[in-house]
Image (cartoon, helix red, strand yellow):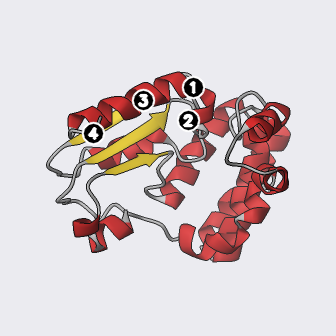
Amino acid sequence: MEYVKKHSTKVDAYVGVGQLIDFKAGLKKTMDYCSKLATDKDMKKLETIQSYLESRSPESLKKASIELEQIQTKHKLAGYKKGDMELIKVVLNSPIFKISDIIPIITTMKTNANLFPCVGGCDLRSYKKFSIPIYFICGKNDWQAPGSVVAEYYETITAPNKGLYWIEDAGHFTDLDDPEACTKVINEICLSFGCK
């Protein structure tokens, strides 16, 4: 989104899938949802995560994210909905991925550790006016970048054309969780501004 704001003449449209809008707001919504499913042990962890968030340092945000993902994984709210073994099969059958991509995909939080100083401070809510079409595709069960944060943001933006699409039976891996529904939405978006 930042690139779109700075270089809108180089972009015809923006399609965000599993879009991060406000990292801290997303963590808060995820924590609220997880607390409804949490065991006593999980609740203790959620309290620790809350203390990490209050310190606001990149290292604390990283710890909060990793520990929250452990709770999410336990309750099947993170990762590929069919599990790591099925994700490995998808990767192995893909013409794009290589075998060497498997470990970084499965250990995403560790792989992306260097992004936390940037991602932890992510808050795109100040970007309100766009000169190009803006579309968001959200998995209804995405608790890594909650669609409810995207939906709230979507209501505040203006663009020549915009759309918010929900994939019912998908999480953060929207295109893998329901490839047919995701493809249908992308085709609809493309047709809306003349692509074939």
Q: Marks 3 and 2: which is nearer the front? A: 2
Residue contact between numbered discs 4 and 1, judged by CB atoms under 8 Å: no
Marks 1 and 2, how far apart at CA? 6 Å
Marks 3 and 1, how far apart at CA? 11 Å
- Left or right: where 185 falls relative to 169: left
| Farthest left residue in view | 160
Q: Secondary structure at mark 3?
A: strand
Residue contact between numbered discs 3 and 4, judged by CB atoms under 8 Å: no
Quick check: can you spot residue 167? no
According to the picture, the residue beneath numbered tag 1 turns out to be 178
Q: Marks 3 and 1: which is nearer the front? A: 1
Q: Secondary structure at mark 2?
A: helix
The image shows residue 189 at horizontal and vertical percentages of 31, 36
- Left or right: where 167 falls relative to 61: left
According to the picture, the residue beneath numbered tag 4 turns out to be 195
Question: Residue type at mark 2?
Answer: Thr
Marks 3 and 4, how far apart at CA? 21 Å
Question: Residue type at mark 4?
Answer: Cys
Sooner in the amino-acid sequence: mark 3 or mark 2: 3
Residue contact between numbered discs 1 and 2, judged by CB atoms under 8 Å: yes
